[in-house]
Amino acid sequence: MNLDLNIKKMLETYADSMSLADKLREILQQAALLGLARHQFFEHASFYGGTALRILYGLDRYSEDLDFSLHKPDLHFNFHPFLEGMRLELESMGFQLHVKIQEKNQESNIWSAFLKANTLELLLSIDERPVIKGVHPEQKIQIKLEIDTDPPVYHLPLVAKLVKNPVPFYVATFHLADLFAGKMHAVLCRAWRNRVKGRDWYDLIWYIQNNIPLNLEYLRVKMLQTKHLMPEEQWGKREFFQKLEQRIDQIDWEKAKADVVPFIQDRRRLDIWSSQFFHDLIKHVKIAAS
């Protein structure tokens, strides 16, 4: 199969309103997943987070990072051979990229790596000369890959999800109720610094709109691991909703909206955002049967 041709077809499938950089980033994300899959990475790790929700389940916002979690804790896991295999696969598809690995230090359980590609070179590599006019020679596309090497010790059944492009392949991921628990952990526990992660709240709306139940027990295990919940603390629906309501009251919703705007096409969807809106919305959160 001509991957070059497939990638050009992928470029044509995106809406005209989507920026060229966003189209190329998403194509590169899927090509990177293919490279990892061909080197058996998903025998060890699962794909999760906002980009997984977009690529696998149709979330209507763009996403930058590829997030993975090992199936079981392994602080000595070596990401290098999988990244090298992915790089070689991408080069065989015609992508010219630079892969930079951020070594995991002893205090962190996260491996990080960055894929960087020159936009102009990327377009020329797939023979897209008609669209290169106006592209700055130094414009870059960057994708961050992160893998959690110390996930909570909790058995999660895995799902094999089909990715159709650039050629059909499978990735390992979690059930939606478990992905919802991971997102809810980010909503409740993510440190903000000076920037509220409005994307977490946008994704929360998606889960609720799609009637996805929340795995409350897995959320508890994750919060215990990160010490956002102590073993002696009570935990159930009442305590969960109390924490969520408290979190809503802490949010600067203008900052949250500003975080989301670059990743969506219709910013009018954010007009309704307020504490009152989210207090009303969370009444529709469903809890998965234990």
Image: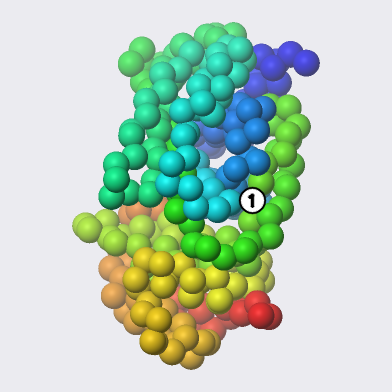
Q: Residue at x 51, y 79 (%)?
A: 282
Closer to the camera in the image, 241 or 9:
241
Quadrant, the C terminus: bottom right
Estimate the x, y position of residue 102 in percent, counting from the top left.
Answer: 33, 33
User: Is residue 18 at all visible to an observer of this figure?
Assistant: yes
User: Is residue 65 at all visible to an observer of this figure?
Assistant: no
Q: Residue furthest left?
A: 194
- Quadrant in the rendering for residue 277: bottom left
Number of numbered discs = 1
Q: Residue at x 47, y 86 (%)?
A: 235
Q: Is residue 206 above or below residue 17?
A: below
Quadrant, the N terminus: top right
Left or right, 64 with respect to 257, comes to right
Q: Residue furthest right?
A: 1
Q: Secondary structure at mark 1?
A: strand
Left or right, 186 with respect to 107, comes to right
Circle 1 is placed at which residue position?
173
Q: Is residue 136 above or below residue 29?
A: above
Kind of residue at disc 1: Thr
